[in-house]
Image (cartoon, rainbow, N blue to C red):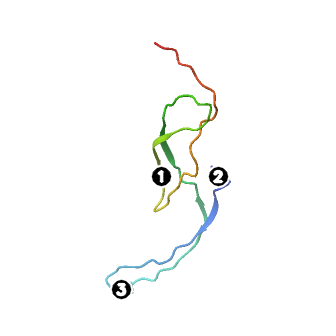
């Protein structure tokens, strides 16, 4: 399935070396570009806990123990703002 962010890309190779005991002299390396590669988005997995709190009329939430996995190599992400709930409505749980 192709999404708007994935597309057919040209993939090129370079820097290949041959270790044949003769400094690579027994072979000739030829590069052929692959012009029909599809590079798909990598999946990221978020796991976190939203702490329970007393209702205060705001949508602010406290997030703890959160992690984001699935990065490739040295990729990272930084949380840009405080987590919020989707509404200020409260839910009442019946007591057992």
Mark 1, residues whose alpha carbon is within 10 Å: few (<14), some, or many (≥20)? few
Mark 2 and mark 3 residues within 8 Å of each other at the beta carbon: no
Query: Which residue in the structure is indicated by mark 2?
Result: 2
User: Which of these two is toward me, 54 or 67?
Assistant: 54
Q: Position of residue 19 (x, y in %)?
A: 35, 79
Answer above or below: position of 22 versus 89: below
Mark 2 and mark 1 residues within 8 Å of each other at the beta carbon: no
User: Which of these two is toward me, 53 or 50?
Assistant: 53
Q: Position of residue 38 (x, y in %)?
A: 60, 59
Query: Considering only order in the chain, which callout, 1 or 3, is on the residue closer to the N terminus?
Result: 3
Helix, strand, or loop for circle 2?
loop
Mark 3, residues whose alpha carbon is within 10 Å: few (<14), some, or many (≥20)? few
Query: Considering only order in the chain, which callout, 1 or 2, is on the residue closer to the N terminus?
Result: 2
Residue at x 63% of width, y 57% of height: 6
Query: Which residue in the structure is indicated by mark 1?
Result: 70
Mark 3 and mark 1 residues within 8 Å of each other at the beta carbon: no
Query: Which residue in the structure is indicated by mark 3?
Result: 23
Query: Considering only order in the chain, which callout, 3 or 2, is on the residue closer to the N terminus?
Result: 2
């Amino acid at each position: 399935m192709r999404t708007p962010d994935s597309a057919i890309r040209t993939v090129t190779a370079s820097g290949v070396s041959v270790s044949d005991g003769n400094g690579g002299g027994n072979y000739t390396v030829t590069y052929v570009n692959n012009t029909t590669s599809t590079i798909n988005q990598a999946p990221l997995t978020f796991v976190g806990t939203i702490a329970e709190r007393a209702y205060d009329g705001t949508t602010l939430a406290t997030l703890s123990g959160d992690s984001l996995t699935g990065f490739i190599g040295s990729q990272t992400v930084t949380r840009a703002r405080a987590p919020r709930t989707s509404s200020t409505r409260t839910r009442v749980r019946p007591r057992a």
